[in-house]
Amino acid sequence: MKAIIHRDHGGPDVLQLVDRDLPVPGPGEVRVRIAVSGINPTDLQARSGPARTKQFSEVTPHLDGAGVIDAVGAGVDRGRVGQRVWLYLAAAGRPTGTAAEYTVVPGELAVPLPDEAGFDVGAALGVPAMT
C-alpha cells in the first residue's frame, strides 16, 4: 500500500511517499481502507513543531479520516466489515495515521458514517467534532 511518512520534524519537505505492507488489525482493532484523510492544525504542529524526543522512528501522520472497514481483529464484530466510518485520533500514541491507503485503529475510534454523509464530511469531523 502507499503511505505518506516522516522520520524527522520539519516542513512539508520531510514527507515521503513510500510502499508499506498492508497493516493487520490486532485484537479490538479494525482496518480501514481510507477514502479521505483529514488534516488539522494538530497534525501540522506534531510534524513541524519544536524537535523533541521522537516516540516512533517513522510516522504516518493525520489523526482524522474516513473510509470503509475491510478487516477486523479478534473481539470485533465481523458485521463491521463493509461499514462506512469516520476516524478520530488515529495517530494519537500510534505511528500510523490516516495518510495511507489503509490504517488500523482501535474499533471505538471508527464511528459509523451515515450513507448520506460523504467521506469528505466524515474526514472533517474527527478532532474538530470531538473538541
Image (cartoon, rainbow, N blue to C red):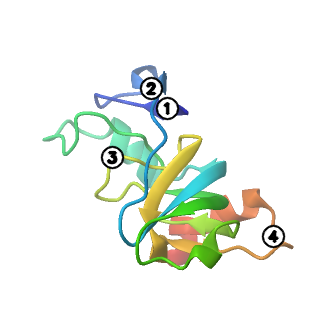
* 115, above or below 120, in the image: below
* Amino acid type assigned to the residue bearing label 2 in the image: Leu
* Amino acid type assigned to the residue bearing label 4 in the image: Ala
Which residue does the numbered mark 1 point to in the structure image?
4
Which residue does the numbered mark 4 point to in the structure image?
117
Q: Secondary structure at mark 2?
A: loop
Which residue does the numbered mark 3 point to in the structure image?
95
Local crowd at mark 3 within 10 Å, few (<14), some, or many (≥20)? some
* Amino acid type assigned to the residue bearing label 1 in the image: Ile
Q: Do residues under tags 3 and 2 come within 8 Å of each other at their CB atoms? A: no
Residue 9 in the image, given as x and y percentages of width and height: 30, 31
Front of the two marks 1 and 2: 1
Q: Earlier in the sequence, mark 1 or mark 2?
A: 1
Local crowd at mark 4 within 10 Å, few (<14), some, or many (≥20)? few
In the current view of this chain or complex, which residue is farthest to the left?
Answer: 53
Q: Do residues under tags 1 and 2 come within 8 Å of each other at their CB atoms? A: yes
